[in-house]
Amino acid sequence: MTQLPAPAKTDVAIVLVAAGRGLRAGRDIPKQYVRLAGRPLLSHTLDSLSVLGASIQPIIADADALMFAQALAAASPAARQLCRAALPGGETRQASVRAGLRALAGLPPYIVLIHDGARCHPSPNLLRRAVDAARQHGAAIPGLMVTDTIKQVDASCQATATLDRALLRAVQTPQAFRFALIEAAHERAAADGLDDLPDDAAVLERMGVPVHVFEGDAGNMKVTRPEDFAMAEARLLLDLPEIRTGQGYDVHAFGPGDHVWLGGLKIPHGAALVGHSDADVLLHALTDALLGALADGDIGSHFPPSDPKWKGAASDQFLRHAVDLVTARGGMVAHLDGTLICEAPKIGPHREAMRARIAAICGLPLGRVAVKATTSEGLGFTGRREGIAAMALATIRLPAGA
């Protein structure tokens, strides 16, 4: 391949391909938005890519704009700063990549990395080696040696040949190229009506351009099948070794009214709970438990009752704020456990709805939220039906030293 002169300044940009539907993953939303270790998978990918300090151009499906916004909000400040406005992809991966390259053409970068949104573990070392390989060779892709024997089969699944695995590589992303080279190749393929090539290297291969294969990273897995989610999350949790537990307690008295707010639900009752906000005693206790795990004050220090802004406020925003503080430290909420102490109303009929509502507020799977209830056997202020108390425990995971 003709060696292109190196520019005075080498610029790098990344096209993040995240417009696919991920049907093989078996989820009801695209796999890149499934939560792993407390955050959407794509937010982890963005964080991993941000170590390069390069501009990131996301390509997404139009229908996923809200989910992408949520994933971006859960990413690190560095990733959010590097991320350009997301653009819609095409019907094929190739069309989506082409849209990303066209968006970067106004820069243009010297080197572009093209990466799959469902690969959330590209290591800093792999990313830097990809850039170096593209500088040296013009076109470079990471590949892993094949350890299993590979058979070629026909349409009836009969083995027809045994391939030499020494000559085979399992290819990953990011694939790295000199921008001018890969942009021209994609435009030519589109002009020739070719829009279903398997990867970006193949776009160059059809033009006779050699593509260098450098050593990939076995940890750089692509989430594809249902069982991959557990493996990907286990790897992410290795980066969150610090486990903390916080406790919360709250109480509110009854006053005139016809309903109470408990666990984010409006429940009919012969009295209301009195408080500066909506007096949701369970959400308040859970909020304090999370703040305790973070060693970050209490609910009153974040939302002072003296501030008229919070008069009558819905308590779900308090709990969401506490979860966001955990995320901002690079952590995750592992489990929430709340207990209501009251004689009435009866909690049993509303327990599962409360769990679901709390899980939705916090962005957690239902299995990580527990809600329980007990009476005080007629003793104390709760036994006299003067109010409701709540206790809570929160378990979080944080990066070491966070």
Image: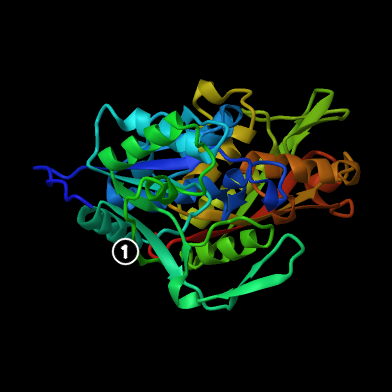
| x and y, in percent, of residue 206 in the image | 41, 47
Residue drawn at 23 percent across, 52 percent down:
1
At 73% from the left and 39% from the top, the residue drawn is 357
Q: Position of residue 36 (x, y in %)?
A: 58, 54
305 sits to left or right of 123: right
Q: Which residue is mark 1?
A: 125
Looking at the rendered structure, the secondary structure element under dot 1 is helix
325 horizontally vs 366: left or right: left
Disc 1 packing (10 Å; few <14; some 14–19; many ≥20): few
Q: Amino acid at mark 1?
A: Asn
Q: Nearer the viewer, residue 107 or 66?
A: 107
Marks counted in the figure total 1
The residue closer to the viewer here, 302 or 164, is 164
Considering every residue shown, the one lying at the far front of the view is 160
State the residue in front, 301 or 102: 102
Residue 45 visible in the snapshot:
yes
* Relative horizontal placement of residue 244, taking residue 253 as reference (left or right): left
Determine which quarter of the picture holds residue 167.
bottom left
When the figure is inspected, residue 57 is found, relative to residue 297, above or below; the finding is above
Query: x and y percent of residue 107 in the render?
Result: 24, 30
Colour scheme shown: rainbow
Q: Is residue 310 above or below residue 131?
A: above
Quarter of the image where the C terminus is located: bottom left
Tell me which corner region of the image, top left, top right, bottom left or bottom right, holds residue 181. Answer: top left
